[in-house]
Image (cartoon, helix red, strand yellow):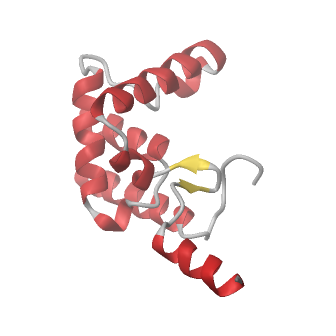
Amino acid sequence: MLLSAAVGAAQNPPEDTHGLSNGRYWMEVPSSHRLMYISGVVDTLIVTHPPQANDLLAPGFNGGETMRCIDQFFADSANIRVPIVHAMMVCAKKFKGAPSSEIESLTIEFRRRASGNGKEGRGK
């Protein structure tokens, strides 16, 4: 029985990383849910932690553009375990015109954290 549970876990990898929804979750939900997710995260941060909202927002860009950027981010399978909020930060940096070297460094850091080196998230 334990073996079958391990096989099942291998077939259905977790849709969260350190308690945060990741690219696996993102790629499974329809576009309408993706837009609601973005809106919910941004609205929550604006109300509860306004300074951190700036990390996820880029003036002049809307939810649809952010969604397409996140889609592109998770199209790279190396990013699939990265939490969605981190993908949103990468996209905001891109939209704000950050140099590609900064985007790549941030992406590598988020991959490292998602791999378990530098854990963060709920309860960590």
Picture residue at 24% right of the left edge, 40% below the top = 69
Note whether residue 99 is visible. no
- Of the 4 image quadrants, the one containing the C terminus is bottom right
Picture residue at 57% right of the left edge, 22% below the top = 45
Q: Choose top left, top right, bottom left or bottom right for residue 79.
A: bottom left
Q: Nearer the viewer, residue 111 or 3?
A: 3
Q: Residue furthest right?
A: 123
- How many numbered badges does the structure rendering display? 0
Q: Position of residue 39 (x, y in %)?
A: 43, 21
Picture residue at 47% right of the left edge, 25% below the top = 54
Horizontally, residue 122 falls left or right of residue 47, namely right
Q: Position of residue 78 (x, y in %)?
A: 35, 68
Give above or below for 4 relative to 50: below
Horizontally, residue 82 falls left or right of residue 50, namely left
Note whether residue 4 is visible. yes
Q: Position of residue 48 (x, y in %)?
A: 66, 18
- Of the 4 image quadrants, the one containing the N terminus is bottom right
Q: Residue furthest top?
A: 47
Horizontally, residue 53 falls left or right of residue 98, namely right
Q: Choose top left, top right, bottom left or bottom right for residue 91.
A: top left
Give above or below for 49 relative to 22: above
Q: Position of residue 118 (x, y in %)?
A: 64, 64
Q: Nearer the viewer, residue 27 or 64?
A: 27
Q: Residue furthest bottom?
A: 3
